[in-house]
Image (cartoon, rainbow, N blue to C red):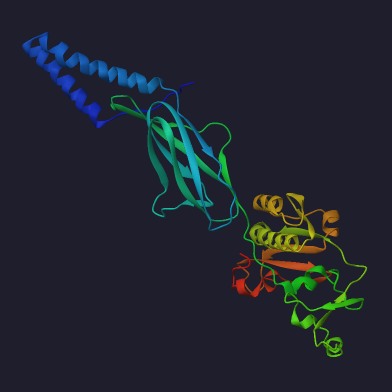
């Protein structure tokens, strides 16, 4: 249904109106013979153009939702427009994403009676962010009148921005698992040949010295507490949700890559992260607003993550971890090549 819209004349319409008015004035002086040649066609054109713009149905604008991504990545947004009259589309984006051209606030594209165009956005920070809405500038076929109409209908199109994921230092595994990672050195398992993938600190030097072939051997330890599943529970203050989400996502990705199933629990829901796949956790953590979990959920935690103001930087949100009653900063676990002051948590 066409609603009331504000119709504006173009310069062409103003010029045509001036010509029609002049013809009418001349007709009053020289007689009506000049009316059919100039005034009547001009008046008909103005009337037809105004009616066409006034009665045209609003264009339909549809977008193809881009794939989720991480802050700093770019995505292409494809837009399709279906219009009865020639139109120019003015497309905007919401907070959390920005246009590739930093000086541009909107994307403007002429599509005639319909068509498609693309534009590139840069993902800025975690969350589910709106694309659009679009405003269409309708024009009649002669370009005499224009009217701006809202073209979005139905559910808005959004792009999902995942939390930042940081590499975890492999040396931090015992701290994360609280001694339950299968490396309990009080329970000797066996000796095996050293491989380049093994850490030098794991070489059993006394046993290696007794080998006649001079080859190094590595001692493996195990214990009844070894497990292949970890539960990570994340909570935060209102301004610490980003820091919490980033820390939980990093832990889930690390455990998943290590072949460990991870249960992720946050105030907005929970999901199970199997080895090799973290997409479900990233979607959940992209949307979480933080808050607190239930006592029963908190009691399940092997690793508790809390996002909030830091002691050293009270105005900056940081994440802390609690494992087996021991609390330490998430930034102390970040893989050294990736560790940067203030980058691990925001």
User: In the rendered image, which quarter is residue 205 located in?
Assistant: bottom right
**Which of 294 and 213 lies nearest the eye of the viewer?**
213
User: In the rendered image, which quarter is residue 330 located in?
Assistant: bottom right
The picture places residue 85, in percent across and down from the top left corner, at 38, 25
The picture places residue 138, in percent across and down from the top left corner, at 37, 29
Tell me if 70 is positioned left or right of 281 in this view. left
Residue for point 47% across, 32% down = 151
Q: Is residue 55 above or below residue 183?
A: above
Which residue of the protein is positioned furthest toward the top in this rendering? 32
Q: Is residue 8 above or below residue 131?
A: above
Tell me if 253 is positioned left or right of 191 in this view. left
**Which of 213 and 47 lies nearest the eye of the viewer?**
213
Give the total number of marks visible in the rendering.
0
The picture places residue 246, in percent across and down from the top left corner, at 66, 61
Which residue of the protein is positioned furthest toward the front in this rendering? 213
Residue for point 71% across, 53% down = 281
The picture places residue 301, in percent across and down from the top left corner, at 82, 60
Tell me if 255 is positioned left or right of 92 in this view. right
Residue for point 25% across, 26% down = 13
User: In the rendered image, which quarter is residue 344 located in?
Assistant: bottom right
Q: Quadrant of the C terminus?
A: bottom right
């Amino acid at each position: 249904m066409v609603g009331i819209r504000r119709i504006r004349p173009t310069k062409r319409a103003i010029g045509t109106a001036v010509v029609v008015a002049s013809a009418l004035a001349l007709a009053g002086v020289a007689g009506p013979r000049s009316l059919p040649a100039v005034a009547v066609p001009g008046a008909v054109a103005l009337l037809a153009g105004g009616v066409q713009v006034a009665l045209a149905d609003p264009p339909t604008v549809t977008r193809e939702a881009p794939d989720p991504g991480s802050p700093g990545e770019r995505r292409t947004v494809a837009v399709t427009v279906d219009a009865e009259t020639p139109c120019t589309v003015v497309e905007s984006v919401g907070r959390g994403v920005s246009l590739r051209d930093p000086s541009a606030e909107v994307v403007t594209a002429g599509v005639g009676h319909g068509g498609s165009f693309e534009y590139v956005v840069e993902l800025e920070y975690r969350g589910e962010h709106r694309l659009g809405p679009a405003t269409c500038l309708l024009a009649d076929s002669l370009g005499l009148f224009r009217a701006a109409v809202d073209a979005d209908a139905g559910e808005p199109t959004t792009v999902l921005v995942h939390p930042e994921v940081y590499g975890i230092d492999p040396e931090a595994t015992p701290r994360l698992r609280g001694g339950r990672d299968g490396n309990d050195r009080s329970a000797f398992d066996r000796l095996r040949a050293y491989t380049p993938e093994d850490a030098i600190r794991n070489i059993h030097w006394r046993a290696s010295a007794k080998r006649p072939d001079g080859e190094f051997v590595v001692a493996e330890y195990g214990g009844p507490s070894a497990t292949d599943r970890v539960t990570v529970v994340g909570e935060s203050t209102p301004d610490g949700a980003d820091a919490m989400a980033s820390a939980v996502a990093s832990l889930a990705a690390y455990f998943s890559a290590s072949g460990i199933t991870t249960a992720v629990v946050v105030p907005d829901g929970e999901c199970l992260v199997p080895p090799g796949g973290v997409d479900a956790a990233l979607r959940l953590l992209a949307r979480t607003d933080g808050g607190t979990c239930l006592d029963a959920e908190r009691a399940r935690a092997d690793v508790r993550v809390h996002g909030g103001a830091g002691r050293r930087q009270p105005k900056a949100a940081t994440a802390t971890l609690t494992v087996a009653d021991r609390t330490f900063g998430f930034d102390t676990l970040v893989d050294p090549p990736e560790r940067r002051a203030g980058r691990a948590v925001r």
